[in-house]
Image (tube, coloured by chain):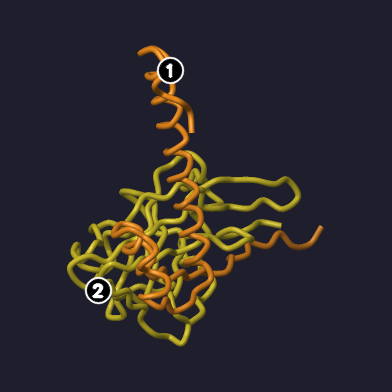
Amino acid sequence: MADYNKMNVDQLIKASLELKIKMAKLRDERKLIIEHIKKCNIEYNVDQVLSRFDSNEREVLRQKVTTVTPGPAILKAEGG
Amino acid sequence: MAASAWAFTNGGRTCLLDGTFDIDTDTYKMALFLSSSNLGASSTTFAGLTNEHAGANGYTGGGASVTLTLSGTTTVTVDISSDPTWTASGGSIVARFAVIYEVGGKIVCYCTLDSAPADVTVTTGNILTVAAHASGVFTLA
């Protein structure tokens, strides 16, 4: 951890902004982790898994995604 | 649960070939319909379809906007740029069919969400995604 006692105001503001950027990146990484957990398509054990996430993240984890993927129709150019 | 392939309406093919549908320029939407809908191969316009999913529970009447794209040369593929999703809220989304149509115009194609055939039900808080197939919505080869 940086020694904030030795920093002037400009340095402290800069350090604060840098941390803010790092926090945003970490939040994005947590979102990616959650999306990957969801893709594993398992039943989550509330105590063991969900308790490790905050309330918003738990909501996302509980959300089930039903994906239907209709196959393609084909237009044929025949002959030639 | 497996969806059927996209199927053209009888008039949809003609509209593709006579230029009625400008695939990568016109505005299209994907809408959900109930099992009781009159949707079928002989359907023509979106306005003529009955029993769209009610505008409730996270679904908006008329459906979701979709952007169709064209790619390829010897095989031209029409694809959806971003898969439409609906998050059920305040009740379930229950639908049998999905339809892609030109806004203010005719139906391009449709599919049965569960080819059994059966309804697809998404309960409150959960998401329904009608995903584009790896080979797109349709191809001309």
Q: Which residue is disc 1 drawn over? A: A6
User: Could you tell me the amino acid type at mark 1?
Assistant: Lys
Q: Which residue is disc 2 drawn over? A: B92
Q: Which mark is residue B101?
A: none
**Neighbours of disc 1 within 10 Å: few (<14), some (14-19), many (20+):** few
Q: Which chain is yellow?
A: B
Residue located 46% across and 62% down the image:
B11
Residue located 42% across and 50% down the image:
B66
Q: Is residue B72 left or right of residue B85?
A: right
Q: Nearer the viewer, mark 2 or mark 1?
A: 1
Pick the front one: A11 or B135: A11
The answer to whether residue B68 is above or below residue A22 is: below
User: Could you tell me the amino acid type at mark 2?
Assistant: Ser
| Residues tagged by mark 2 and mark 1 found on one chain of the structure | no
Q: How many marks?
A: 2
The answer to whether residue B15 is above or below residue A6 is: below
Residue located 64% across and 45% down the image:
B71
Which quadrant of the rendered structure holds the C terminus of chain A? bottom right
* Label 2 element class: loop
Snapshot quadrant of residue B84:
bottom left
Q: Is residue B88 left or right of residue B25?
A: left
Q: Which chain is orange?
A: A
On the image, the x and y values in percent for residue B133 come to: 58, 63
**Neighbours of disc 2 within 10 Å: few (<14), some (14-19), many (20+):** some
Pick the front one: B77 or A17: A17
* Label 1 element class: helix
**Subunit of label 1:** A
On the image, the x and y values in percent for residue B86 come to: 33, 61
Residue located 27% across and 80% down the image:
B36
